[in-house]
Amino acid sequence: AEEARRAARLLGGSVAVALLLSAALLIPPGAWPAAFDAAGVYTTWARALNVVGGVGFLAGAAFLAREARGSSVSRLAPGAGEAAVFATQLVLFGVAGLLFWLSDVWSPVWWLFHVLRFAAYAVALVSGAEVFRRIEETQRGHLERELALQTADLERMREELSRSLATAGQPERA
């Protein structure tokens, strides 16, 4: 019960922060601190914001990695696969956020954090495709079993009808 209340408070706080940040986007762009200085270099504000985001992603990854661990080495807990996938995605986003501090536009580090972000999206895409494939495979198995049952029922009815028609034309024995 306490864990459920704590989860509800965390969710409520997250929603409140998200709403506040979303409302802040309505502020005219000129009111925001500049992301680049006059020379076109990222400002400390932009770098710090990305590093804070990176640390947040890494904290989320640590939480999900803990959730992914099973009760034994040989068996993962239910949902561990999904937690591991999202932990991987969060690590990639987190490292990309931290690398932002070291980057300048079009530098090798800039490209690296873009590649890491792309990889994070690719992890999610591949994982989603795998989930879709497993669902499709499960559904196909259910449909094949249902088709086999209905085919067997139809075959049984056909045999009964054949017997009924064969005996319908014969006189009754007394």
Image (spheres, grey):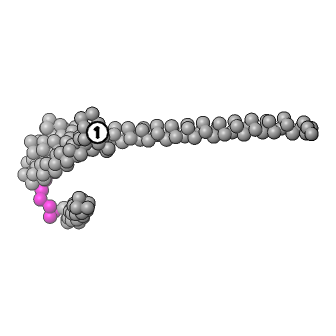
User: Quarter-wise, where is residue 70 in the image?
Assistant: top left
Residue plotted at (52% across, 40% down): 142
- Which corner quadrant holds the N terminus? bottom left
x, y percent for residue 145: 55, 38
* Residue drawn at x 19%, y 48% as measured from the top left: 63
**Does 166 sit left or right of 88 as displayed?**
right
Main SS, magenta residues? loop
Residue 81 position by quadrant = top left
User: For residue 26, which quarter of the picture?
Assistant: bottom left
For label 1, the residue is 76
For label 1, count other residues whose C-alpha is less than 10 Å away and answer few (under 14), some (14-19) or many (20+). Answer: some
Q: Which residues are magenta?
A: 30-36
The amino acid type of the residue labelled 1 equals Leu
Percent x, y for residue 71?
A: 25, 41
Whether residue 37 is visible, yes or no, is no
**At which x and y percent is residue 79?**
31, 44
Q: Residue at x 13, y 38 (%)?
A: 109
- Give the total number of marks visible in the rendering: 1
